[in-house]
């Protein structure tokens, strides 16, 4: 009897085990992130971005979570935030953190959902957003007040900033000169009104070795270089001057061309090498200069360059600044002029007006002279004809007889 009870209980345990093994087991589901978004649609630098993430607990019991936010820019973390919370079964919650980006460009926003101990990762959502700016656009130019400076002396330069946007602001300007052994750099901050141009005089130390150098000015905003401008100057111990003469203004219509020989004279006391003549600030395809260079030019010697400017038919009719520049390995000389591209009608109208005016003057003068001649002729024709010699003698005889 005792063995029978043991067998019965053993059989019951086996049946219960089979039932437990064959019956479906409902597993506890982990949490998940069901929604991520941001606004505005086009984020603006330095202005808040509203981020949002929804988390839900689809399980059958309450759970505790840790939601981590990480923002990545250029492979580096720029912002991190953490939220710890509990959720009842089948419940959800939304989070709306804010972030103000300090740089323009693309960002990755990462939401990760962990358990409270941050050992198990339940879900990950990643979204990308592109931050833009509502300032600018900007333009910058830098012009040294001299093309030559002695080693170690300061180089004065005009810095022109233009803000073509609708927002006034302070801008950082970085000016640098790459010397042979170091880079000379200075930073300036200038206030630039909206829709306005600002001109500043700056001074930069020059390099200590003779040679041709570039001075570069850049506008830096939100840790990025927005626009740059460069110009050249020469550092030399001895003074070498180049002389040439160019027109202050050239006027052409679209499709027109202009040729001019330029004589460049070396007024220095030493030979210069690899002398070139170039036109700056107008497109390269508009110009042709021959020869491309002159190998050597001795003191008081003159080199001749043929400059040809051809304006394409589709060129915009406006004023272009030109820089006529003679440059050698030892020195450079620059002169500023303008290229006026005017519509064809404007060019033809002026000569026509001058010709018409001259024609009217000639016609008027001719008419006046003709009128005077006609009046004199009429007076002459109205005079009585002169008496003949025979009639005069006849009357004299008759008068004598009567006496």
Image (spheres, rainbow, N blue to C red):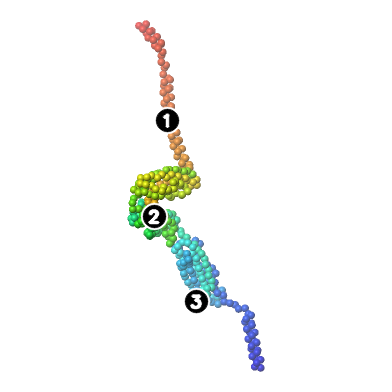
Q: Nearer the viewer, mark 1 or mark 2?
A: 2
Which one is nearer the viewer's eye here, 132 or 93?
132
Tags 1 and 2 touching, CB below 8 Å: no
Tags 2 and 3 touching, CB below 8 Å: no
Residue drawn 38% across the image and 57% down it: 179
Q: Which label's residue is closer to the chain start, 1 or 3?
A: 3
Quadrant the N terminus occupies: bottom right
Q: Which label's residue is closer to the chain start, 1 or 2?
A: 2
Q: Secondary structure at mark 3?
A: loop
Q: Is residue 398 above or below residue 179?
A: above
Q: Residues within 10 Å of mark 2 (few under 14, many from 20)?
A: some
Q: Nearer the viewer, mark 2 or mark 3?
A: 2
Q: Secondary structure at mark 1?
A: helix
Residue holding disc 2 = 213
Residue holding disc 1 = 365
Which one is nearer the viewer's eye here, 97 or 12?
12
Residue holding disc 3 = 117
Q: Secondary structure at mark 2?
A: strand
Q: Quadrant of residue 245?
A: top left
């Amino acid at each position: 009897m005792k063995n029978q009870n043991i067998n019965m209980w053993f059989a019951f345990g086996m049946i219960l085990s089979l039932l437990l093994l064959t019956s479906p087991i409902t597993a506890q589901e982990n949490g998940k992130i069901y929604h991520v978004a941001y606004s505005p649609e086009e984020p603006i630098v330095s202005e808040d971005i509203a981020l949002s993430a929804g988390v839900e607990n689809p399980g059958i019991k309450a759970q505790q979570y840790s939601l981590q936010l990480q923002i990545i820019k250029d492979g580096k973390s720029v912002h991190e935030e953490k939220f710890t919370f509990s959720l009842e079964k089948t419940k959800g919650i939304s989070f709306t953190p804010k972030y103000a980006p300090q740089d323009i460009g693309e960002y990755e926003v990462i939401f990760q959902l962990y358990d409270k101990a941050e050992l198990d990762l339940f879900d990950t959502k990643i979204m990308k957003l592109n931050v833009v700016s509502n300032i600018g656009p900007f333009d910058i130019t830098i012009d040294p007040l001299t093309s030559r400076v002695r080693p170690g002396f300061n180089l004065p330069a005009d810095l022109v900033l233009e803000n073509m946007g609708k927002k006034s602001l302070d801008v950082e300007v970085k000016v640098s000169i790459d010397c042979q052994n170091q880079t000379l750099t200075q930073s300036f901050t200038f206030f630039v009104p909206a829709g306005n141009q600002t001109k500043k005089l700056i001074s930069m130390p020059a390099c200590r070795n003779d040679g041709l150098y570039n001075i570069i000015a850049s506008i830096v905003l939100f840790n990025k270089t927005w626009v740059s401008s460069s110009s050249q100057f020469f550092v030399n111990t001895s003074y070498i001057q180049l002389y040439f003469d160019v027109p202050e203004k050239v006027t052409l219509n679209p499709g027109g061309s202009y040729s001019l020989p330029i004589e460049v004279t070396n007024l220095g006391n030493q030979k210069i090498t690899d002398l070139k003549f170039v036109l700056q600030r107008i497109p390269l395809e508009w110009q042709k200069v021959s020869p491309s260079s002159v190998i050597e030019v001795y003191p008081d010697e003159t080199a001749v360059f043929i400059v040809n400017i051809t304006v394409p038919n589709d060129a915009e009719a406006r004023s272009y600044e030109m820089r006529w520049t003679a440059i050698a390995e030892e020195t450079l000389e620059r002169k500023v002029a303008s290229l006026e591209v005017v519509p064809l009608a404007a060019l033809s109208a002026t000569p026509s007006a001058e010709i018409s005016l001259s024609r009217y003057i000639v016609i008027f003068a001719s008419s006046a002279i003709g009128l005077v001649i006609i009046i004199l002729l009429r007076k002459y024709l109205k005079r009585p004809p002169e008496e003949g010699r025979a009639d005069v003698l006849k009357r004299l005889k008759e008068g004598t007889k009567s006496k």
